[in-house]
Image (cartoon, rainbow, N blue to C red):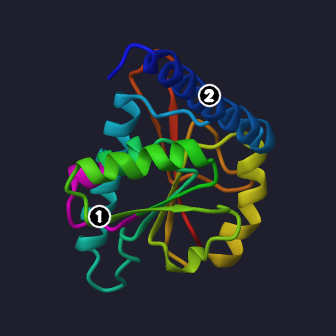
């Protein structure tokens, strides 16, 4: 490559980087929060709780619960939680929903690097998703989004479906369990079952 091409290549890369940052900032402003990946300890705790729920469902022979899978991650961000779930349990089907272009593209890129045929990342509105199909909904959202998601989950989830909320509780729902992670922030994970 000729030396004269380096400034042009640098300018193109800088423009692409600035465009990506602007897209993240814009979508964060529109959503009210920026996409935040869950810490390793939170991801491990969510996997542990899902396995426990699955064991409990398998033990109930008379009145079986709704299966754990498909798992819907509402607001999948960079895809790290969905891929951690897939890695921990290859039989779980996972759908991640994200409306921010750059994190969604990043999650799709991560998906291509791994052998995760059971994971699908959709770019779209998490408030328009058909939650009737979900066995479990996992969300790491902010209080305003949880408040907005509350009536949708009440109306659309099948009785017996579960909701796992990281950090913020669902307003008006009574958790069947609250787990405190051993991370720096002592992050709480709320586990619910739809009546």
Measured along the vertical axis of the image, is residue 145 above or below residue 18?
below
Q: What element carries label 1?
A: helix
Instruction: Please provide percent x and percent y for residue 21.
Output: 64, 29
Quadrant (top left/top right/bottom left/bottom right) for the C terminus = bottom right
Neighbor class of circle 2 (other Cα within 10 Å; few <14, some 14-19, many 20+) is few
Q: Could you tell whether 14 is left or right of 83 in the image?
A: right
Q: Could you tell whether 46 is left or right of 139 in the image?
A: left
Residue in the image at 44% along x and 21% along y: 5
Which image quadrant for residue 98? Answer: bottom right
Which mark sits nearer the N-terminus, 2 or 1?
2
Q: Which of 69 and 109 is in front in this view?
A: 109
Q: Nearer the viewer, residue 125 or 142?
A: 125
The span shown in magenta is 85-94
Residue under pointer 1: 54
Neighbor class of circle 1 (other Cα within 10 Å; few <14, some 14-19, many 20+) is some
Q: Is residue 190 visible?
A: no
The tag on residue 88 is none
Which image quadrant for residue 67? Answer: bottom left
């Amino acid at each position: 490559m000729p030396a004269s091409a380096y400034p042009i290549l640098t300018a193109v890369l800088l423009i692409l980087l600035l465009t990506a940052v602007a897209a993240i900032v814009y979508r964060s402003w529109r959503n009210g929060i920026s996409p935040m990946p869950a810490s390793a300890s939170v991801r491990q705790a969510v996997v542990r709780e899902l396995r426990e729920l699955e064991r409990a469902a398998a033990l109930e022979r008379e009145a079986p619960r709704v299966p754990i899978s498909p798992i819907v991650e509402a607001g999948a961000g960079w895809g790290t939680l969905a891929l951690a779930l897939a890695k921990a349990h290859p039989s779980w089907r996972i759908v991640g929903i994200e409306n921010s272009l750059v994190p969604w593209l990043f999650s799709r890129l991560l998906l291509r690097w791994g052998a995760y045929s059971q994971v699908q990342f959709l770019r779209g509105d998490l408030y328009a998703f058909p939650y009737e199909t979900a066995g479990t909904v996992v969300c790491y959202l902010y209080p305003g989004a949880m408040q907005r998601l509350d009536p949708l989950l009440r109306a659309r989830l099948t009785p017996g479906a579960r909701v796992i909320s990281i950090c913020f509780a669902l307003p008006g729902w009574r958790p069947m369990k609250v787990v405190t992670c051993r991370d720096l922030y002592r992050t709480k994970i709320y586990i619910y079952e739809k009546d």
